[in-house]
Amino acid sequence: MDEHEIARRASALPDRFADRISPQTLEIIELMDGGGEYGLLTIEVAASLAAHNTPVTAAERDELLALLEAMEMPTDPIEKLNVQG
């Protein structure tokens, strides 16, 4: 995954999870997206979903994990996700 693919996929996360994260978190991750902070954005999305026990699909978990690994970011929140189905 190159930088452009990382940016494209991470930039899609705020819209993808907008209905499952708090408005405050959404505002923060949108600011991170605008600033190109894709690693922090991805960690914040995963951590918020995990902290609130929000259901995610296996595909969503895999997407978050792939992004974090591609950016060499910690993957700790991934194991705490509430994966459904």
Image: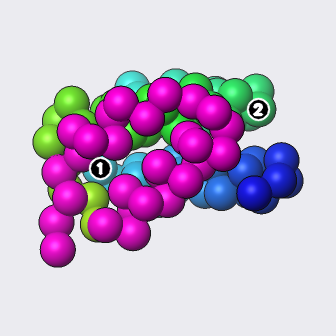
Residue identified by numbered label 2: 36
Point 63% across, 33% down: residue: 72
Residue shown at 17% from the left, 74% from the top: 85
Which mark identifies residue 20? 1
Residue range (magenta): 58-85
Disc 2 crowd, CA 10 A, few/some/many (<14, 14-19, 20+): some
Tell me the kind of residue under disc 2.
Gly
Colour option used: rainbow
Name the image quarter holding the N terminus.
Answer: bottom right
User: In this view of the protein, which residue sits in the foreground, 20 or 66?
Assistant: 66
For the point 43% across and 35% down, which residue is it?
A: 75
Q: Is residue 39 left or right of residue 81?
A: right
Q: Which mark is residue 2?
A: none
Is residue 20 part of the magenta span, yes or no?
Answer: no
Front one among 31 and 61: 61
Asked if the residues shown at circle 1 and circle 2 are in contact, with their CB atoms under 8 angstroms apart, the answer is no
Near-viewer residue (35 or 58): 58
Drawn side of residue 63 relative to residue 52, left or right? right
Q: Using the rendered view, name the quadrant where residue 12 is placed.
A: bottom right
Q: Position of residue 25 (x, y in %)?
A: 41, 29
Q: Quadrant of residue 44?
A: top left
- Which residue sits furthest bottom? 85
